[in-house]
Image (cartoon, rainbow, N blue to C red):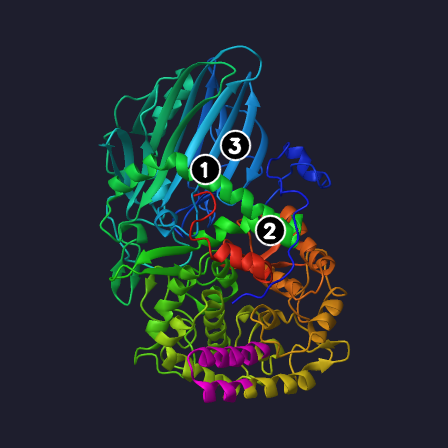
């Protein structure tokens, strides 16, 4: 199912240690271990509700936040010979100097030095894509390692707390808490008093049901309790720590804010490193509502309890760290081999963000279902034109996860309530997947995306068939695919005035890029029909796609480039959909077309990237990477990607990576923390050897 292709070897693995904050302003040198400054840094990134970030260069410069920007504070101090130094979050006292920060696909690591000690703080999320049991666990491992740097021993204590903000939408909500023992672990938990499970939906929301958990395995000098901020002040004053929970509950989350707190007394620390650790988790009990069925997280599908999950996670901590480190190094090496250093660092930053914009749940039969959220767009759930740009990530790492996203949509589209001849746009508003809400919903064709979503679904299902070596998934839902292919055959060549995935740009008739999608989807349908033994249908649709491609070339050509719309001479647009002609091996369009387009695009770039089209100066990060993948040589690919690296390292907007920004100054236009940044992994699909390597890891790297 994969053709052979030459592979390149990495000159050097992407370095992920940062020599110092000042180094971010210096030019890159191939042998220097530098991780770029990023708009924001992932700390605890699991799903749309459990996603905590640092929005600053230094971990101790400001409060940590949910991806939406609302504070969800994680705070930490190291006490050295009686002197408190803050290494995380905001609050009282002096800060310890941050000397480095490294971002790997599964880990974020900070280093600090001061008062004669070196501190390393690590956030490890075992986001291993072929292990859905582990991947779906809402748990991040926290660890802190201290050693002396001056040859002397120092009396050291570590203090860490997680705020009640993790379990509320806003500080006015009332919370309750408690402490229990799970085996020999001490587990602190906090949640709302009301527990309104799956009772509301929307975009700029935080979870307000379930329980935030801080699990502390038995370790020398460990004390843990749920306390108020006043108790933290007492600790900072003299090192004292509460021996029991604060019991003044329920109370509003903002009043003497309740904290899940742990103190480690490390005793006298010398040259030998001393490590302490904890686990931060979130038990949401029920995660998603799909067609009125409340579904639990995938890790719960066989009845596992939160207590059992914490015990299993603790027992596997060491092996998971080894697997995570091996995965990180291998992936980073391969990313650089395929696309260069700047591309690799961009893809590494996109890794956890992509996963954290999804939730993996179990259907009633135990099969995985995976739902995306349109973060800071409109809050829709399982949006097809979010799945489409994100699909290269899942096609590369685990096609089963793409099936898990497509299956809920295909089952919905088979219901009588979906009466249109084209594919739906979404399944509702996160976390309630009870039916389309976008545009005309189930009521009218107004403001739908007929060509867009129908083409998206067929293209993704053909890509699944290519990587899996069979069309079994397509066979299950053939009646829907038949309807959508017929619609595209009738409407796809010259689309009517309708929306595409770039709906922020408004309606557009005769959209040349949308037409490419329809044509490639028709040939993809022909490929699927052929695999299923439907020879006449396959031949008919293949012939139709070929004829439409020939017509497209005449309709779109405009001198040295192609038009934005067939009726608009003097315009242009990124033809990013054309990349599937190359990746799927359809070969409907001549090789001269992408070469012509790349030459033209290189003349139109702004300082921070190639504009989406001739109408505006803004752009989309995912689409630039798809367009760059059309290039026939590494030089042109890097020329188009390098401005994206500049955007990542210099954008004035400090939020989780935005995919919609200005090419003139790198400022965010809209959207943040969206899954579509996973689209940067499309370059890996363009290397058949890499695609085969990463999608067929039944044993998995590092396992």
Establish if 657 lies above or below 237: below
Disc 1/disc 2 C-alpha distance (Å): 20 Å
The kind of secondary structure the magenta stretch mainly shows is helix
Whichever of callouts 1 and 3 sits on the residue coming sooner in the sequence is 3
Q: Residue 335 carries which label?
A: 2
Residue at numbered disc 3? 60
Mark 2 secondary-structure assignment: helix
Task: Tell whether label 3 touches label 1 (CB within 8 Å).
Answer: no
Task: Tell whether label 2 touches label 1 (CB within 8 Å).
Answer: no
Disc 3/disc 2 C-alpha distance (Å): 31 Å
Mark 1 secondary-structure assignment: helix
Whichever of callouts 1 and 2 sits on the residue coming sooner in the sequence is 1
Identify which residue is drawn at 60% across, 51% down. 335
Identify which residue is drawn at 29% across, 34% down. 188
Whichever of callouts 3 and 2 sits on the residue coming sooner in the sequence is 3
Question: Furthest-front residue in view?
Answer: 4
User: How many dots with numbers?
Assistant: 3
Question: Looking at the figure, which quarter contains the C terminus?
Answer: top left
Q: Does the magenta stretch include residue 331?
A: no
Residue at numbered disc 1? 322
> Which range of residues does the magenta coloring cover?
516-542
Disc 1/disc 3 C-alpha distance (Å): 28 Å
């Amino acid at each position: 199912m994969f053709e052979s292709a030459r592979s390149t070897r990495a000159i050097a693995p992407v370095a992920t240690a940062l020599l110092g904050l000042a180094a971010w302003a210096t030019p890159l040198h191939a042998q220097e271990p530098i991780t770029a400054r990023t708009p924001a840094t992932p700390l605890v990134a699991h799903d749309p509700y459990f996603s905590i970030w640092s929005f600053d260069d230094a971990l101790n410069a400001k409060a940590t936040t949910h991806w939406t920007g609302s504070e969800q504070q994680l705070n930490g101090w190291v006490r050295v010979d009686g002197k408190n130094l803050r290494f995380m979050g905001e609050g009282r006292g002096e800060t310890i100097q941050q000397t480095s920060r490294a971002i790997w696909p599964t880990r974020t690591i900070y280093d600090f030095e001061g008062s004669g000690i070196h501190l390393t703080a690590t956030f490890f999320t075992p986001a291993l894509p072929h292990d859905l049991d582990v991947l779906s666990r809402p748990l991040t491992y926290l660890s802190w390692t201290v050693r002396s740097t001056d040859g002397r021993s120092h009396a050291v204590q570590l203090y860490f707390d997680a705020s009640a903000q993790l379990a509320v939408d806003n500080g006015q909500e009332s919370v309750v808490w408690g402490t229990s023992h799970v085996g020999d672990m001490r587990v602190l938990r906090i949640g709302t008093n009301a527990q309104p499970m799956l009772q509301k939906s929307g975009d700029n929301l935080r979870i307000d049901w379930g329980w935030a958990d801080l699990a502390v395995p038995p370790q020398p000098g460990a004390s843990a309790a749920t306390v108020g901020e006043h108790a933290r002040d007492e600790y900072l004053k003299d090192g004292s720590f509460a021996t029991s929970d604060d019991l003044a509950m329920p109370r509003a989350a903002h009043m003497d804010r309740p904290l899940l707190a742990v103190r480690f007394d490390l005793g006298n620390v010398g040259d030998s490193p001393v490590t302490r650790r904890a686990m931060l988790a979130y038990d949401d009990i029920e995660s998603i509502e799909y067609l009125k069925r409340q579904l639990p997280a995938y890790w719960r599908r066989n009845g596992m309890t939160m207590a059992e999950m914490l015990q299993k996670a603790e027992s596997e901590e060491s092996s998971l760290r080894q697997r995570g480190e091996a995965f990180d190094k291998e992936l980073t090496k391969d990313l650089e081999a395929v696309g260069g250093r700047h591309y690799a660092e961009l893809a590494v930053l996109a890794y956890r963000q992509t996963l954290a914009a999804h939730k993996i749940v179990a259907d009633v039969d135990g099969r995985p279902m995976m739902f995306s959220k349109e973060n800071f767009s409109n809050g829709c759930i399982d949006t097809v034109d979010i799945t489409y740009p994100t699909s290269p990530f899942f096609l590369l790492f685990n096609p089963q996860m793409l099936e898990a996203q497509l299956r809920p949509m295909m089952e919905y589209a088979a219901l009588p309530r979906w009466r249109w001849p084209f594919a739906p746009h979404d399944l509702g508003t996160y976390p309630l997947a009870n039916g389309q809400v976008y545009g005309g919903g189930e009521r009218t064709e107004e403001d739908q995306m007929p060509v867009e979503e129908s083409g998206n679904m067929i293209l993704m299902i053909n890509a699944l068939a290519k990587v899996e070596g069979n069309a079994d998934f397509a066979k299950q839902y053939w009646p829907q695919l038949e309807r959508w292919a017929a619609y595209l055959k009738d409407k796809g060549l010259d689309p009517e005035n309708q929306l595409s995935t770039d709906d922020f740009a408004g309606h557009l008739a005769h959209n040349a890029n949308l037409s490419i999608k329809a044509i490639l989807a028709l040939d993809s349908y022909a490929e699927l029909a052929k695999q299923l033994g439907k020879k006449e249908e396959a031949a008919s649709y293949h012939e139709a796609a070929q004829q439409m491609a020939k017509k497209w070339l005449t309709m779109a050509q405009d001198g040295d480039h192609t038009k934005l719309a067939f009726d608009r001479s003097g315009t242009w647009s990124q033809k990013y959909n054309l990349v599937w002609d190359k990746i799927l091996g359809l070969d409907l369009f001549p090789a001269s077309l992408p070469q012509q387009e790349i030459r033209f695009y290189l003349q139109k770039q702004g300082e921070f990237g190639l504009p989406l089209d001739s109408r505006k100066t803004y752009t989309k990060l995912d689409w630039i990477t798809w367009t760059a993948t059309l290039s026939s040589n590494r030089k042109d690919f890097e020329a188009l990607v390098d401005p994206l690296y500049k955007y990542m390292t210099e954008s004035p907007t400090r939020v989780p990576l935005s995919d919609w920004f200005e090419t003139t100054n790198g400022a965010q236009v809209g959207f943040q923390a969206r899954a579509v940044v996973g689209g940067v992994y499309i370059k890996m699909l363009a290397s058949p050897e890499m695609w085969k390597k990463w999608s067929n890891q039944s044993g998995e790297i590092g396992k």
